[in-house]
C-alpha cells in the first residue's frame, strides 16, 4: 500500500492521518516532539524538521510526502523532492512563505488584495504611509502568525515607531492599507495532481486576540458574494498551479467587495467545520488531491459553527461533554468534539475544536454563549 509522509506532527497532521487511514493509506510523521498529536496515530520519526538525515529517512520510507505547515526549510523541501515525491512542489511553499511574493501571485491571478507597499527603509515607510493613509498595517514579510509580527498604525506619527519595532534585525516588511471589512471569510480549495479543482463553501471567521475563535457556515454574506469568493479562490489556486489544499483568507467590505488577505498551502483551522459539515472533509480532500484520487463532493450537509478549544477552555469543555446537554437539545444543536491529544493545556494553545451541527447558526452561537466557557468577547 501507499505510505504518506507528513512533515510536522501537530493537529493538522493528525487529522490528515485519521482521514487518510480510512482511505487505506499508511502514514509516517517527522516531528521532534515525543508523543506528538500526529505521532499518536501514525509512525513517527523523532527529529527536527530541518534535520537532513531524518528527512532522507522519511523520503526513503514514503511514496508521497506532504507538510502541515508552510515554513518548511528550503533545503529539506528540495531534498524531499529529489528523493521521494512531493506533489505540492516547493514553489507553492516559496510563494506562500513570503507576503510580498504571495501578494504578487494573487494579483497575477487577477484577484484583488489590499493596496500595499514594500518597505525596506524608514524613508519608504514615510512615503508609503502618506500614500496609503491611516489606518494601515505594517507586517513582517516572513514568519508572522496569529497576528505576531504586525502593527496597526492609526496615526501618521506612529509610523516611525512601528517601523523600528518590526525592522529590527533587518526584517523585510509590507505596509497594507487597513480594510474596514464587514467580516472575514475563507475559502478552502483543493486542486489535484491531475488539475481537478473544487472549493468548499466559504466560512465566516471571527478572531479573538488574533486567534481564530469561531467559523460560521454558511457565512452571513449574500449568496453572490459567496459564489464570487469561491471563484476568486479557485482562480488563485489555478494560477499558482497549486496541488493539495490552499486556504484563501479574504476581507468582505460593506459593499460586498472582496480582498484576499493571505494564503496557506495546507489544511486550515477555518476548514475544520468540513469534518462533519461537508460531504468530504478538507483532510480527506487533501489526501485525495496529493494522491491523485478524484476529489470528493464539497457540498455542505448542514449549517455548522466551529469553535476552537484553547488551553484555557479545555477543563470546562471536558466537564461539559461528560454530562447530558439539555441546552443543546433545546437549541437543536449537535456538538461534535475533536481533541488533539496534546498533554499540556497552555493558555492560547489549540487543544481541540467543536463542530456544532445545527439548523440555524444563530442557535449554535447561542449554545456557545450559554456555556459560559468562552466568556465575553
Ligand atoms: P494567521 O494566524 O491567520 O496566519 P497572521 O499573523 O498571518 O494570521 P493576518 O491574517 O495577515 O496575520 O492578519 C491577522 C488579522 O489582522 C486578520 O485576520 C485581520 O483581522 C487583521 N488584518 C490583517 N491585515 C489587515 C488589513 N490590511 N486590514 C484590516 N485588517 C487586517
Ligand atoms: Mg498568516
Ligand atoms: Mg490570517
Image (cartoon, grey):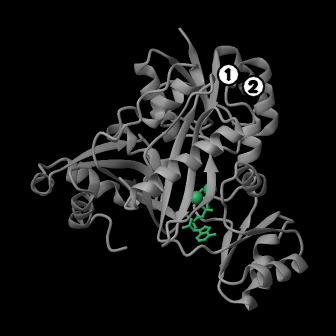
Label disc, if present, on residue 80 of the rendered structure: 2
Please state the horizontal and vertical placement of residue 263, each as a whole percent of the image.
Answer: 63, 50
Q: Nearer the viewer, mark 1 or mark 2?
A: 2
Q: Is residue 105 left or right of residue 17?
A: right
Residue 342 appearing in the image = yes
Residue at x 37%, y 49% (from the top left corner)? 353
Q: Are marks 1 and 2 in contact (CB under 8 Å)?
A: yes
Q: Residue 173 appears in which quarter of the rendering?
A: bottom right
Q: Residue 140 appears in which quarter of the rendering?
A: bottom right
Q: Quadrant of the C terminus?
A: bottom left
Judging by the rendered image, the residue that carries numbered circle 1 is: 58
Q: Is residue 132 left or right of residue 292?
A: right
Mark 2 surroundings within 10 Å by alpha-carbon count, few (fewer than 14), some (14 through 19), many (20 or more): many
Q: Nearer the viewer, residue 251 or 159?
A: 251
Q: Secondary structure at mark 1?
A: helix
Ligand 1 quadrant in view: bottom right
Residue at x 72%, y 18% (from the top left corner)? 84
Amino acid at each position: 500500500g501507499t505510505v504518506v509522509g507528513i512533515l510536522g506532527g501537530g493537529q493538522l497532521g493528525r487529522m490528515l492521518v485519521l482521514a487518510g487511514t480510512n482511505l487505506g493509506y499508511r502514514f509516517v510523521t517527522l516531528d521532534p516532539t515525543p508523543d506528538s498529536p500526529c505521532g499518536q496515530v501514525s509512525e513517527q520519526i523523532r527529529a527536527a524538521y530541518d534535520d537532513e538525515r531524518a528527512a532522507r529517512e522519511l523520503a526513503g520510507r514514503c511514496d508521497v510526502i506532504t507538510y502541515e505547515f508552510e515554513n518548511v526549510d528550503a533545503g529539506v523541501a528540495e531534498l524531499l523532492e529529489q528523493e521521494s515525491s512531493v506533489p505540492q512542489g516547493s514553489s507553492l511553499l516559496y510563494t506562500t512563505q513570503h507576503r510580498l511574493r504571495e501578494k504578487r501571485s494573487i494579483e497575477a491571478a487577477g484577484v484583488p488584495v489590499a493596496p500595499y507597499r514594500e518597505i525596506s527603509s524608514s524613508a519608504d515607510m514615510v512615503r508609503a504611509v502618506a500614500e496609503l493613509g491611516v489606518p494601515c498595517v505594517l507586517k513582517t514579510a516572513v514568519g508572522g502568525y496569529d497576528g505576531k509580527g504586525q502593527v496597526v498604525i492609526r496615526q501618521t506619527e506612529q509610523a516611525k515607531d512601528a517601523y523600528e519595532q518590526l525592522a529590527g534585525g533587518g526584517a523585510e516588511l509590507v505596509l497594507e492599507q487597513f480594510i474596514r471589512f464587514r467580516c472575514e471569510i475563507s475559502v478552502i480549495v483543493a486542486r489535484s495532481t491531475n488539475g481537478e479543482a473544487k472549493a468548499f463553501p466559504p466560512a465566516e471567521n471571527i478572531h479573538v486576540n488574533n486567534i481564530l475563535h469561531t467559523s460560521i457556515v454558511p457565512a452571513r454574506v449574500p449568496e453572490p458574494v459567496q459564489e464570487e469568493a469561491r471563484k476568486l479562490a479557485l482562480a488563485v489556486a489555478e494560477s499558482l498551479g497549486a496541488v493539495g489544499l490552499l486556504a484563501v483568507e479574504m476581507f468582505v467590505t460593506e459593499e460586498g467587495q472582496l480582498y484576499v488577505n493571505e494564503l496557506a498551502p495546507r489544511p486550515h483551522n477555518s476548514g475544520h467545520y468540513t469534518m462533519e459539515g461537508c460531504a468530504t472533509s478538507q483532510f480527506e480532500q487533501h489526501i485525495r488531491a496529493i494522491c491523485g484520487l478524484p476529489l470528493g463532493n464539497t457540498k455542505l450537509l448542514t449549517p455548522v459553527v466551529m469553535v476552537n478549544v484553547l488551553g484555557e477552555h479545555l477543563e470546562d469543555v471536558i466537564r461539559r461533554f461528560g454530562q447530558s446537554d439539555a441546552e443543546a437539545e433545546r437549541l437543536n444543536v449537535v456538538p461534535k468534539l475533536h481533541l488533539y491529544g496534546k498533554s499540556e493545556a497552555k493558555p492560547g494553545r489549540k487543544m481541540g475544536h467543536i463542530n456544532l451541527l445545527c439548523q440555524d447558526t444563530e442557535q449554535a452561537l447561542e449554545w456557545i454563549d450559554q456555556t459560559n466557557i468562552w466568556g465575553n468577547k
